[in-house]
Amino acid sequence: MSKTNYSYVGIALVILVFGIIFIPRIVDRITNKDVTREESRSKNVSTQLSDETKLAFLNINGTPKKVPDFSFTDQNGNTITNKDYDGKVYLVEFFFTTCPTICPRMNSNLVQIQKNFEGIDNFGVASFTINPKNDTPEVLKAYAEKYGITNPNWHLMTGEQEAIYKLANEGFNLYTAEDKTVEGGFEHSGNFALIDKNGFIRSRFDNYGNPMIFYNGIISEEEQYDDEGMKEEISLLKEDIAKLLKE
């Protein structure tokens, strides 16, 4: 037998041994779902967190922080309270309709989230104006139409300014203040709060094992990063909403 033929025989033996030893193992792993293939065929986002990874609570002195009671008037003239959000996963923002800076960006991002969870009855948004003197129900309704707000659980609310500011600063720990020296006349946080079905403030853990607490609402998914290099968190928020909807 020539040297070439010996080489072919050697290769054939290697292939045979591989088939005998490894192919049954591969088949067994596939059968037992150790090897999987993931596909995404839906426009709706699916959480990237494992089912075992629970979202964090915002704890104050060891006690999970819950949304305080509130009662305001929405864009349709209806009285809306925290009880209207019972059993729903929802987002909270503080804004005003004449905001010339971050509010348009925040609400454009919220509309994108709205589209992602379109048709889901137990998802909503609570938007509180920090300029209630200007933002009447009629003004809020026109603003909702302008931005394409269609989710029936998205309420744009107005009421007494003192009560709204207390809700923002103490109830959600989201900074809000009137300041005539800044553009637009008001300062407020550009973050969103995520609330679970039982009214608790929730978030994912960061890379250091600490709760993120809030989600940046200004940077869009399309932008990915802002001018200072901060990464968008809208995609994370979508994942975590989906997570809470399954709880």
Image (cartoon, rainbow, N blue to C red):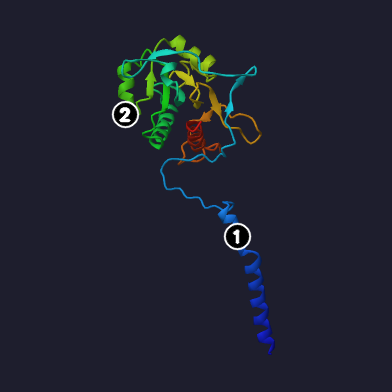
- Mark drawn on residue 26: 1
Disc 1 and disc 2: Cα gap in Å? 56 Å
Front residue (pair 108, 199) = 199
- Snapshot quadrant of residue 114: top left
Q: Is residue 56 left or right of residue 183?
A: right
- Give 103 or 120, whichever is nearer the viewer: 120
Helix, strand or loop for disc 1? helix
Three-letter residue code for mark 1: Ile
Callout 2: SS: helix
Q: Amino acid at mark 2?
A: Lys
At a point 50% along the width and 37% down the height, the residue shown is: 239
Residue 231 versus residue 157 in the image, above or below: below
In the rendered view, would you say 176 is above or below 226?
A: above
Q: Position of residue 60 (x, y in %)?
A: 62, 18
Q: Position of residue 52 (x, y in %)?
A: 59, 36
Please identify, in this view, whether the residue under mark 1 or under mark 2 is nearer the observer: 1
Residue drawn at the location 33% of the way across and 31% of the way down: 148
* Residue 221 locus on image (x, y percent): 47, 39
**Mark positioned earlier in the residue sequence (1 or 2):** 1
Graded by Cα atoms within 10 Å as few (under 14), some (14 to 19) or many (20 or more), the crowding at tag 1 reads few
Q: Quarter of the image for the N terminus: give it.
A: bottom right
Q: Is residue 75 left or right of residue 182?
A: left
Q: What residue did someone put label 2 on? A: 146
Who's the residue at 65% across and 33% down the image?
A: 209
